[in-house]
Image (cartoon, rainbow, N blue to C red):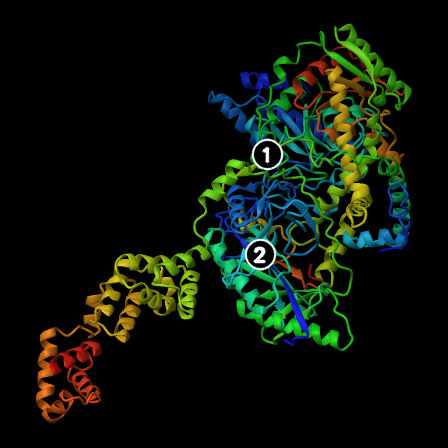
Amino acid sequence: MSTALALAAEVRSGRRSAREVVEESLAAVAAGNGELNAFLTVVGDEARAQANAVDAAVAAGRDPGPLAGVPVALKDNLCTRGSVTTCGSRILEGWRPPYDATVVESLRAAGAITIGKTNMDEFAMGSSTENSAFGPTRNPRHTGKVPGGSSGGSAAAVAAGFTPLGLGSDTGGSIRQPAALCGVVGMKPTYGRVSRYGLVAFASSLDQIGPFATTVEDAALLYDVLAGHDPLDSTSLPSVPEPTLASVHDGSEGIRVGLCRDLVDGCSPDVAARVHEAADALAGAGAKVEEISVPEFAYGLSAYYLIAPAEASSNLARYDGVRYGLRVDGEDAAAMNTATRTAGFGAEVKRRVMLGTYALSAGYYDAYYAQAQRVRTLVMQAFDRAYESVDVLLGATAPTTAFDLGAKVDDPMAMYMNDVCTIPSNLSGHPAISVPFGTGDDGLPVGVQVMAPALGEAILFRLARVVEAHAPQVAGS
Amino acid sequence: MSADWEMVIGLEVHCELATATKLFCGCRNSFGDEPNVNICPVCLGLPGSLPVLNEQAVELAMRIGDALHCEIRPSEFARKNYFYPDQAKDYQISQYDRPLNTGGWLELPDGFRVGVTRAHMEEDTGKLTHVGASGRINAALHALVDYNRSGVPLVEIVSEPDIRTVAHARAYASELRGILVATGASDGRMEEGSMRVDANVSVRPAGTSAFGTRCEIKNLNSLRSLGRAMEYEAARQIALLESGGSVDQQTRHWDESAGRTESMRSKEEANDYRYFPEPDLVPLAPDAAWRERVRAGMGPMPSDRRAQLAAALDGAPTDAEADQIKAVVDLGLDGLVRAAAEAGAPTSLALARAANEVAAQSEAGLSLSATTFAALLAMESGGQLSATQSKAVLGALLERGGGDPAAMAKEMGFEALGADTLSAVVDEVISAHPGEWERFVSGEDKLMGMFTGEVMKATSGKANGKEVAAELRRRRG
Amino acid sequence: MSDHEERAPGRVTLSREDVIHVARLARLDLREDEVELFTAQLRTVLDHAADVAALDLAHLEPSSHPIALQNVLRPDEPRESLDRGEVLAVAPEVEDHQFRVPRIGGEVP
């Protein structure tokens, strides 16, 4: 499919109908989703109705919005009213929320067309989309490989050309890492920049919704639609966001880039090589590139795997069979809760819920949870120090290219290691983006990660655009 | 209670705040509606929902803190995690480590001070109805949940264990209720559940200082239950200890009809609530300007109003008047009394009538016009109505929601006898009993009663006894 | 609680009993083989976390948020509630317009 920017321009000008664009998208999904399992739910009728409405607006001379007629894939942890929302879990199989997430409303107001809900690791816990209760998603670039996770479905939908845009959520890297593995752009905004109202919570102080796209420009376009204050989210930043699309081509002249060794050295050599090449490209384009070390990043993984499960153990308590979702009967309410959760949750969710419960429990709170929050402070301070000498940071997104389906499912710790480069900016709440940059030795995509200080989305997209512009051409992408 | 033992009491009062909407969402805060009509994603704990704090709830919570002489300080919200069907998220948003109000006190009418440890904000649960044999939880077959009350704002007020007598416990609850109503924070209706009192009761040998093991007593729906339950519980604990046993720390339910407390919790370990800071809310730190507005805006508290009434009397109040003052302030009728006094009515008469007759129809009393009340009292103190008649007219005025006292008196047949009519009747009676009159005139005072009685008979009771006596004395010379 | 080594940072070993206890707190039923598996897996994660647990960070405040907002409030104004029918339509069991659950066994929090 064409880019979102191009499609929107065609639809807004009347050169192409939104209906036609949507039919193209739906046809692609129908043809390819059986193999990839990117979409769990396709809302064809609804999409057509939305497209008709956009076309009617154009015909009547009304502004249909900046994303007019552009198909979007939504991760299945975003509430869509009347439309099945499972979060990749049996416990919400068939559940239809009675309300829309704020971002869904924003998309609609911008004229975008929601094509359907995409597959994910159950409750966003995972790095491969293999923890879905509804089967894994396959990487479009190599169907024997994982697409990454937890937003694997949206990444695959965009990579496969089903839709030009996708939405995912990123708690420890769940947008950026699948973007890297699938060879698309994936971005996590500053914490609080995009409303979480209607995003089914995994780890509240870390979750953020963000865009998938095939180009940096498209990602900026989508980000600009999503960003802004929401009175329904207390953690939503009150300030008006700086638009990023207009400045995305401003280049990297004079920008100080810190090539972060801690986000490169632990990666496989081919991935590291791509990152160094990206750094060279930036230097060639006028940026001031220097190596920087932030050793505190090494503690991020452990801190994350205490904080996130702790918050998750509390956020997932509501799945108890009482008000919605699965219910498995029991002789009393407590037995019913237990039977329901035991049947409804997969192994990874159970693991993290227990880990989180343990970290918060009496006698352990200070040694684990509170300590992890102190590490968070440590990481935040380390970022602040780094940004005294550089404007952005550069590193790998994921330590390797896409691995085989089934390769890491039995080794949770190995799976968790996939997040080592992405976690630091979740802890700090800073924005970060993954840009495709060539391939590994196996021909699979590599993503390079750019990170900026809080509220630095504009400079983030600018640098990302330069990286993208210098990315090696990849066959078949 | 035997002099060998001392009871130690601390009271926990949950007060529902009189806001228009719930603590974290815009659903109506309303009692008695059809089940589950005041619900939304937030108070139902639907996936993806987020809390946003109600400004007016904070205002009222601050007023409570100020009225109890607490320090109002920067605070944060915390999650209290436990599974229960009336808890929509299976955690309650409350305050734990850093409550809004701390370190206050409440002075009882007799001058005894009870410390207030803290008064923090939290959300209420839904309402459970147990369906089964007796409607009691232990005999239930199943239960029904109504979430209208879920998310209603509460302030939990915890006293220091300073109370030593049942009388003081009741006085504390009563005085606190008056304060909560005076601040506008609550309507203080224990029977509707807007004010719930739990008692922590322990005993210790008289004269010792170490605290005994305490039990928490719940389900106290009136001041009377509070008193009965504490007496029962203290006796139970004393009996246990005197027979060589020990008191288990537990929560006990007061059974009003059986007249005893019963253990509620199972023998398993106490709940580990795994408190941690609520990540979906940001800290609450009312600024100095807001705290000052609260302080400056505080109206008179019950103790202030009792003092004002006492000052309006001639001299120090008698014991009976002190009780009347307390009753009148409790019912909010002190304004009426003061206004009547300002309009010329004798204060102690106004007080007495308000404490008895108006109190009997206190709802109506709150809308009784002070002018009407004063006019009636003037008729009584001026001798046109007897005390009995005045009370009757007052009762009728209250029932009718107001009216003109003179017209009401006439309607009820209490019209004051004109001086001429009375004179004429006295003439008749004297001429009918010449012999007795001679004896009365020469000093047989006991004949006063006979002549008064005859005049009353002749006027069908309409004459004012005092006036008759005065007229007879005047004739005698 | 249960038998494990000192509860000092970096030297705790998660026991089977801990896992069973925590599963009960979280309303999860584990099969015997799951208890074994999860104990081993969680131990690995916690061992990895021992490096963090052992750091001397007493001089740092724990951060529960990555943002420095405070006093986010909303006015006390009613908003439309959900349609009761739409909500109850997806509820597992309904009676008298309420959510029906099995009897609640003695444990009241």
Q: Are marks 2 and 1 on the same chain?
A: no
Please determine whether, in this image, residue B274 is positioned above or below residue A4: below
Residue at image point 53% right, 64% down = B171
Residue A132 figure quarter: top right
Disc 2 is placed on an element classified as strand
- Residue situated furthest bottom in the rendering: B435
Residue A327 vs residue B445, the one in the foreground:
B445
Residue B106 figure quarter: bottom right
Residue B140 at x, y = what percent?
65, 68
CA gap between label 2 and label 1 equals: 35 Å
Residue A234 figure quarter: top right
Q: Indicate the quadrant containing the C terminus of chain A: top left, top right, bottom left or bottom right.
A: top right
Residue B107's label in the rendered image is none
Circle 2 sits on which residue?
A: B14
Residue at image point 77% right, 42% down = A133
Circle 1 sits on which residue?
A: A102
Q: Is residue B33 left or right of residue C108?
A: left
Residue B441 at x, y = what percent?
13, 87
Residue B27 at x, y = what percent?
52, 47
Residue B147 vs residue B462, the one in the foreground:
B462
Q: Indicate the quadrant containing the N terminus of chain A: top left, top right, bottom left or bottom right.
A: top right
Q: Amino acid at mark 1?
A: Thr
